[in-house]
């Protein structure tokens, strides 16, 4: 295993575990310092949860309201669907949310409205429900029952209670295949209990949840007749997508706003490393960065900025939004404006810090920044485990990007995971289980009723499905969209292209349901 | 739990475990004796293995040869694909067979021939390879590499060696989902090692192996581009197929030959029960049945005959065959001829015994019959476990059938399984995981490239797919066919309709491969 700063381990909180893992497994780039630079994981799981979760309005107006537009329920879920060992029949309490405000219940000859089911991803399901206003917005039109199912080992759905994260003996059951089977069993049971066994089910998911939604449609077509997968990077595995594409895309976002902005950010990392190489320098940088406590490792400052630029690119929405952090419309443009407003001779660290501050402190209420340390109130840290088992998404940082170059090594990731959890990743399991390689050929004549939506401002779009696969496996791509923008509540400020994208999604879903009802009628004749 | 003869347990060998389970779980029919009548499982796993396994000729001539037309190989397979607990990474030696006699290896610009992969079922893979001559017969035309993969926990593929069947701790990993993942990993690895990552794969399977083949195509379309599922009763679960259909079909086979034959068999069970109710009667019956040892339980005699009639219906082939037992062409007709040849006033037990003897002793070399006891040289007894976990196929015996009526109860099956293995079945897991309910609607617009072939003389056909689902999910049904007849080696005596069925299968497979190659060429442009 390559050398790295052992002490770094201690200061990186569990929430940022993925960052550490990626850092440890990246080979040192030529000419870089011997100390490892961390490559932050851009997955939301590795993010601080939003500080001010806001529930979408149940009336679809887009106006936020403090009341929760759903009720919480719990399902007795079996621990292991794929074995019958004595442990496998252990039952845990699996959380899901319901909103039946708009549901067209079965009455006489009239068929029930559809179930719109969100396939929860790596966090508290209430967070995802709160940030998927699209489902609330379109429910009235379809008379849909809304269901949001939590992913096992997140939020309240802890199979071993407080011991769930104790070791591989318990965490071992945190896998995507078990989660998909959870969804299948819960949906089937729910429909049975509601006496609507024939109601159509459409699954929705964003990011990892979108990967799950599309895989669910492919693996359980008898449970879900359609899937809307927003910003789902199902092709970010193996060699399907170039490993450099993610950070190249982040960099392009900034470069497209201003070449100066890109150049400033690209130049800051070495300056930061040099100044932070001793205690005096770190003290000075801590003041520059307005750190709440004096920073002990210069990597913490790099990570802090890296996170800001990466996640701002992901959430480069055309309207003000509060998904990961509270941000103005087009925040990348705003960051670059900040950088470009400095006099040419100003200090590069000052420029980059000012831009990054927009991410953490747009509302201006942060008196200081917790550059090191943090908490995990939403129980998001299971992604560290998932990134060490199934979710091996190789990423390089190219020398053309605005980040310091780094590589990826399966071997080093594996060693790091053994050290952290005592297990080895199965590097190619995801593509063996779910496919991905040559997907345009494999699914050309197999499967149906999937929407893959992506916005090209979102660096995750590069690992998504960006072209139509068939007449019913559709790619909806917007040049200006960001990470599952289409799933956010509609607002009056939405630009036409996202209004149009959502309109197309509604039209396609309507087509699925019409066809389903027609098929049902024909079959029952 | 309903009362039953406890001592029966001790005398029923492991091989016939399924019989006992079904017997125990069937409620006593009205008017039946309080002692339970066993309902034999018609699944091949519950059968004695063939006494004279004969390898098909590699030249496709149908002439048997003693040389094995395959080589055995072993793959390091992971125990549990769906968890990452410390136990899951245990590796076992997974057996598969290869025949590359006809394989068109990749050479220059010429694409490699396809892989034809048999998805092994509940027994020694060599037995299935030996009885699937169809694949050998058609390999030359396609230039196909033949691969036969053993099912975990059968034959030599024992994850825990001699301890594999010790308890639920080990047997727990014997599930269909794990087996399918085994296949996916092995095929992917094999193609990689042979440097033919793009070669098309078609999976073949008969009976439970056919269920696996069709499920594999549905779950792993990126690994197999087509599936031929022969006599695969994927709809024999839940309430999809009437529970009485299996034994009604057996009875119809006999009735169609001769009403007298049907009536004689229908009347024998009560006579047998009455005569066997005491030791003197059992001694006399043991002589009538030419038992090697005096029979201790009259149920053993019923089972022995029940097995003969049921399995003869399954293997009611139009040519002499030696799959389960050595039998003449149209053996049901032959049995009925035997019964009908008796004088009207002859003893009903004599008639039924004479007919049943055809099944066990067509060649006339059995000096006596092992009515009680037996052995399991082919390691087939895992089906007992599978029938207690996933494979819950409810079966009743109706009063219209030629067998004594009996019912089925989920609760009693469950209690029996707890008693036998300490685990409870998951009654509806198969339809949740693989579907089946409303399959004609679900797959009408999903999936492709599956052939479901059935012969209506085979009682399993009733639980199969008997109508086309779409233009590429095809049902091939023959009125006179029996259990995966199409998969047997061609012979000169084959009737036209089976020749035609196989011709259609070849034509359809050729169409899949042509389309695959065309798609590949277009995609690479």
Image (cartoon, coloured by chain):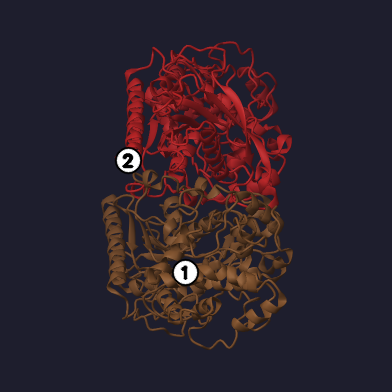
Chain colours: A brown, B red
Crowding at dot 2, Cα within 10 Å, few <14 / some 14-19 / many 20+, comes out as few
The chain under label 2 reads: B
Viewer-side residue, A344 vs A46: A344
Residue at point 58%, 56% (across, down) = A175
Crowding at dot 1, Cα within 10 Å, few <14 / some 14-19 / many 20+, comes out as some
Q: Is residue A193 visible?
A: no
Q: Which disc is residue A241 wearing?
A: none
> Picture coordinates of residue B17 (x, y %)?
63, 36
Viewer-side residue, B224 vs A348: A348
Circles 2 and 1 on the same chain: no
Residue at point 57%, 58% (across, down) = A406
Q: From the viewer's perspective, is residue B207 above or below residue B63?
A: below
Q: Which residue is mark 2?
A: B525
Q: From the viewer's perspective, is residue A322 above or below residue B243?
A: below
Residue at point 41%, 38% (across, down) = B225
Q: How many marks?
A: 2
- Identify the residue at the far front of this view: A345
Q: Is residue A1 visible?
A: yes
> Picture coordinates of residue B187 (x, y %)?
52, 36
Q: Which residue is mark 1?
A: A263
Q: Is residue A225 left or right of residue A128?
A: left
Q: From the viewer's perspective, is residue A399 above or below residue B211?
A: below
Give the label, 2 or 1, closer to the camera. Answer: 1
Quarter of the image for residue B71 reads top right
Viewer-side residue, A5 vs A366: A5
- Element class at badge 2: loop
Q: From the viewer's perspective, is residue B86 above or below residue A275?
A: above
- Whether tag 2 and tag 1 are in contact, CB under 8 A, the answer is no
For the residues labelled 2 and 1, the Cα–Cα distance comes to 38 Å
- Element class at badge 1: helix
> Picture coordinates of residue A164 (x, y %)?
67, 64
Q: Is residue A152 left or right of residue B212?
A: right
């Amino acid at each position: 295993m390559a050398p790295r700063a052992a002490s770094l381990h201690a200061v990186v909180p569990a929430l940022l575990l993925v960052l550490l893992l990626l850092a440890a497994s990246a080979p040192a780039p030529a000419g870089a310092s011997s100390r490892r630079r961390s490559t932050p994981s851009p997955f939301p799981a590795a993010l601080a949860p939003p500080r001010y979760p806001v529930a979408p309005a149940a009336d679809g107006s887009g106006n936020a309201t403090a009341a929760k537009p759903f009720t919480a329920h719990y399902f007795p879920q079996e621990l292991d669907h794929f074995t019958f060992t004595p442990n496998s029949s252990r039952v845990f309490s699996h959380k899901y949310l319901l909103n039946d405000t708009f549901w067209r219940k079965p009455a006489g000859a009239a068929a029930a409205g559809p179930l719109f089911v969100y396939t929860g991803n790596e966090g508290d399901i209430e967070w995802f429900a709160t940030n998927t206003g699209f489902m609330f917005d379109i429910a009235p039109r379809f008379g849909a029952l809304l269901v949001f199912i939590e992913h096992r080992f997140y939020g309240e759905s802890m199979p071993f209670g407080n011991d769930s994260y104790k070791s591989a003996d318990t965490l071992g059951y945190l896998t995507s295949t078990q989660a998909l089977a959870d969804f299948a069993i819960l949906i089937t049971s729910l429909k049975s209990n509601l006496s609507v066994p024939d109601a159509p089910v459409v699954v929705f998911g964003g990011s990892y949840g979108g990967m799950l939604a599309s895989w669910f449609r492919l693996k359980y077509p008898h449970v879900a007749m359609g899937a809307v997968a927003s910003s789902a990077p199902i092709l970010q595995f193996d060699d399907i997508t170039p490993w450099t594409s993610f950070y190249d895309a982040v960099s392009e976002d900034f470069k497209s706003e201003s070449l100066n902005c890109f150049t400033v950010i690209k130049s800051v990392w070495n300056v930061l490393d040099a100044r932070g190489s001793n205690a005096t320098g770190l003290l000075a940088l801590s003041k520059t960065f307005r750190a709440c406590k004096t920073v002990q490792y210069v990597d913490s400052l790099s990570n802090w900025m890296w996170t800001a630029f990466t996640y701002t690119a992901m959430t480069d929405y055309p309207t003000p939004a509060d998904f990961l952090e509270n941000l103005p419309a087009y925040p990348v443009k705003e960051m670059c404006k900040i950088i470009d407003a400095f006099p040419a001779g100003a200090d590069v660290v000052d420029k980059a810090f000012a831009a990054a501050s927009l991410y953490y402190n747009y509302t201006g209420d942060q008196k200081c920044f917790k550059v090191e340390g943090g908490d995990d109130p939403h129980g998001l840290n299971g992604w560290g485990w998932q990134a060490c088992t199934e979710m091996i998404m190789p990423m390089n940082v190219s020398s053309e990007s605005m980040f310091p170059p780094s590589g990826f090594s399966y071997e080093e990731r594996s060693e790091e995971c053994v050290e952290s959890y005592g297990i080895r990743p199965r590097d190619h399991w995801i593509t063996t289980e779910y496919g991905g390689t040559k997907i345009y050929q494999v699914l050309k004549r197999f499967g149906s009723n999937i929407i893959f939506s992506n916005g090209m401002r979102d660096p995750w779009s590069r690992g998504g499905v960006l072209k139509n696969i068939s007449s019913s496996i559709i790619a909806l791509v917007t040049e200006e969209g960001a990470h599952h923008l289409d799933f956010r509540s509609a607002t009056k400020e939405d630009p036409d292209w996202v209004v149009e994208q959502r309109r197309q999604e509604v039209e396609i879903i309507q087509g699925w349901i019409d066809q389903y009802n027609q098929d049902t009628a024909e079959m029952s004749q």
